[in-house]
Image (cartoon, rainbow, N blue to C red):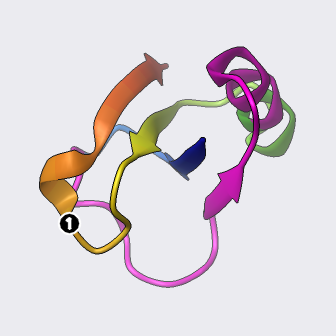
Amino acid sequence: MKFYAYKGQAKLGDEKLGTSDRMIFELKTSKGAIRRCLKRFSFGDFRLYQIGEIYDISTYKEITFFQ
């Protein structure tokens, strides 16, 4: 499964531009994706999405929102 995560509370499409504080990655489970985000974002607030098609935002499914 492919995942997209970024730091902050902004909704999808309103997040900051640039490469800092966001990532696209592939893992087998969503539980593993949550753990990777917790490590990367130092237990800060972030949003995590499962990606269907990378260029079609309507296929993104929100997994979790931490704050």
Classify the position of the N terminus by image quarter.
Answer: top right
Which residue does the numbered mark 1 point to in the structure image? 56
Percent position (x, y) of residue 58? 12, 51
Q: Residue at x 33, y 61 (%)?
A: 53
Q: Nearer the viewer, residue 44 or 64?
A: 64
Query: Does 25 appear in magenta?
Result: yes
Q: Residue furthest left?
A: 58
- From the viewer's perspective, tell me whether residue 22 is left or right of residue 11: right
* Residue range highlighted in magenta: 11-36
Q: Is residue 66 visible?
A: yes
Q: Is residue 13 visible?
A: no
- From the viewer's perspective, tell me whether residue 39 is left or right of residue 6: right
Q: Secondary structure at mark 1?
A: loop
Percent position (x, y) of residue 67? 49, 19
Q: Residue furthest right?
A: 39
Which image quadrant is residue 63 in? top left
